[in-house]
Amino acid sequence: MHVGVLEDDLDQQSFIEQCLISADHQVSLFGRASELRRATQETLFDFLIIDWRLPDGCGMDMVGHLRQNDGWLGPILFITASQNEEDVVQALEQGADDFLAKPLRPRELIARVNALGRRAG
C-alpha cells in the first residue's frame, strides 16, 4: 500500500516510515497539512496516517476536510499523544477509521495499518 503520513515531528516521521517500510509499504511523508492536502490532489494514496497537532492546523480539521470536502474514502489512522476518551471519540466521529495513542508500538502500528487496509479492499 502507498501510505501518506502527516506528522511534523521528524523522529516520529522516521519511526513510522521505518515501521511501514519493514512491512513492505510505500511511504510519503508530510510535515504540514497543506503539503498533504496538495499531495492528495496529485497522488493516489491507499491509506493516510494523520497526527493531531500540526504546525499549520489541526489533524482533526484535516480529517474532516478530507472526508467532507475532498471526498476521501480511504482509511485514515489518527495518531496523537492524547489518550483522553473524548479525543478518541471526536477523532472517530470526525471521520478517522482508527485511533492510536503515542508512544506508537511498531507491531501494533503495522497490524492496524494492515487490518484497515484489508477492510478497505
Image (cartoon, grey):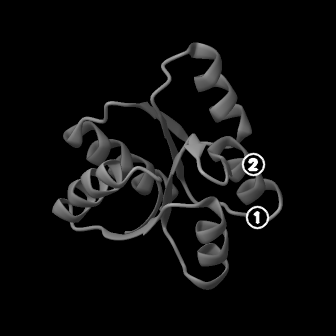
SS type, badge 1: loop
| Residue to which mark 2 is pinned | 64
| Residue to which mark 1 is pinned | 71
Is 102 left or right of 42, judged from the image as shown? left
Give the number of marks: 2
Q: Which residue lies furthest to the right in this view?
A: 69
Q: Residue furthest top?
A: 85
Q: Looking at the figure, which quarter contains the N terminus?
A: bottom left
Q: Residue furthest left?
A: 22
- Give whichever of 61, 116 is nearer the camera: 61
Q: Which amino acid does label 1 sit on?
A: Gly
**Image vertical order of residue 48 relative to residue 105, above or below:** below
| Residue 48, position as x, y percentages in the image | 51, 58
| Residue 50, position as x, y percentages in the image | 53, 50
- Give whichever of 33, 47 is nearer the camera: 33
Residue 15, disc: none
Eye-nearest disc, 2 or 1? 2
Q: In which quarter of the image is residue 105?
A: top left
| Residue 11, position as x, y percentages in the image | 29, 50
Q: Residues within 10 Å of mark 1 (few under 14, many from 20)?
A: few
Q: How crowded is mark 2: few (under 14 residues within 10 Å), some or many (20 or more)?
A: some
| Residue 92, position as x, y percentages in the image | 64, 33
SS type, badge 2: helix
Is 69 left or right of 90, judged from the image as shown? right
Q: Which amino acid does label 2 sit on?
A: Gly
Residue drawn at x 27%, y 59% is 20
